[in-house]
Amino acid sequence: MAKRSQGFALIAVLGLLMVLSLVAAFIASYAEQRLEQTFQLREQLQGRLDRDATLATLMHVVATRPLVQNAYLLRSPPPAESSYDPFSSAAADVDVSTYPHLSVDGRRYQGIGASAFALQDEGSLLSLLDPDRERWTALFRQNGLTPQQAERFLDQLQDYTDQDDLRRLNGATSSDYLNQGLAPPPQRLMISPGQVFNLLDSTALHDPLLAMLPFATTRSGQLHNLNTAPAAVLQTIPGIDESLAEALVQARQIKPFADLADANQRLGRIIPLDPLAAPSQASPYLRIKLWTVMADCRQPIWLGLSSTPTSRTTPWEIDYLFSLDHEQPCRTPQPVAFPPLLEPAMDG
């Protein structure tokens, strides 16, 4: 009888130990999950801090540094070399490549900490206000779409922004939006390029629109600026094919073009543009794109600025701000070795 009691006691002890082991394993797993969540939250918060610090630095650069040709100079030219005047074109003679600078042609830079950024002159992009149909159709072709899809997009765009509720051939009116449970057109011009996702066909064209969005602007745009237009936008200009567009981008990264004649001479080709319609100086409209760099570039922030150097309040105005909830592979950003404005690139 005593042996049986001892056996029951042993079984009870083993059962208790098993229960305690399961409880301990659960607590350890729970604690590990909580730690992982804490690390992720800390990483996200640090990413936001890095991004906000980078944006504050860039706003300071835009407000205090000269914009010459296709770049903001991080150090102004000495008076002996150039008497810089922001309202004069004389500064265009400065060789930007000999100074630390941030180009406004969309190239990606390493920001503070785990952030990256790009600056883009919006004056050279394709306008959503008064779209050039020929150039937009060329951009649609680059993205594997048909001229018919381009026409439908452009008709819907103009029906969305004009002041009447009349339908163009391939457009859409308020009733079409309401029938699909969508908000009706505001009947006014877009203020943010992200508003293209409000169009009737935006769901069906989501991925192509996402790919084309960096080349669209709600400014007047469409300047033939060989110094700042992305290669995809250059290819929409009649007479500029893919090879010429890539040659222009590679040449201007070495040294910006002083004017159209300089581009013709350096490339050894006659570019079919009107010299008066091909400015070499960036416009006062700037887009800042910010990413938090992890495994992927997540939720890029888009911010549009207008330069207002004569204002009595601020040297710039924020025209739009939005974020895109998508991920994309991160290209290696170019470091900006100019402390204390921006930290050196991260290792690895």
Image (cartoon, rainbow, N blue to C red):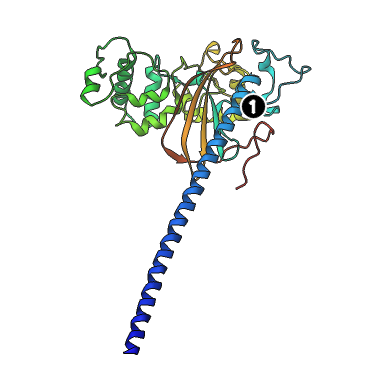
Disc count in the image?
1
Examine the rendering and report whether any part of residue 244 can be seen: no
Left or right of 56? Residue 204 is left
| The one of 70 and 10 positioned closer to us in this rendering | 10
Examine the rendering and report whether any part of residue 236 can be seen: yes
Q: Residue visible at 43% across and 60% down? A: 27
How many neighbours does mark 1 have within 10 angstroms: few (below 14), some (14-19), or many (20 or more)? some
| The one of 33 and 270 positioned closer to us in this rendering | 33
The quadrant of the rendering that contains the N terminus is bottom left
Q: Is residue 83 above or below residue 112?
A: above
Q: Residue visible at 57% across and 38% down? A: 333
Give the percent coordinates (x, y) of residue 226. Answer: 55, 22
| The one of 45 and 84 positioned closer to us in this rendering | 45
Give the percent coordinates (x, y) of residue 233. Answer: 46, 25
Left or right of 250? Residue 11 is left
Give the percent coordinates (x, y) of residue 171. Answer: 27, 18
In which quadrant of the rendered view does residue 154 lie?
Answer: top left
Q: Is residue 179 above or below residue 8?
A: above
Residue most toward the right? 80
In which quadrant of the rendered view does residue 190 lie?
Answer: top left
Residue type, numbered disc 1:
Lys
Residue where numbered disc 1 is placed: 255
Left or right of 102? Residue 324 is left
Left or right of 309? Residue 229 is left
Q: Residue visible at 56% across and 36% down? A: 49
Q: Residue visible at 33% across and 85% down? A: 5
Give the percent coordinates (x, y) of residue 244. Answer: 51, 27
In which quadrant of the rendered view does residue 46 lie?
Answer: top right
In what element is the residue under mark 1? loop
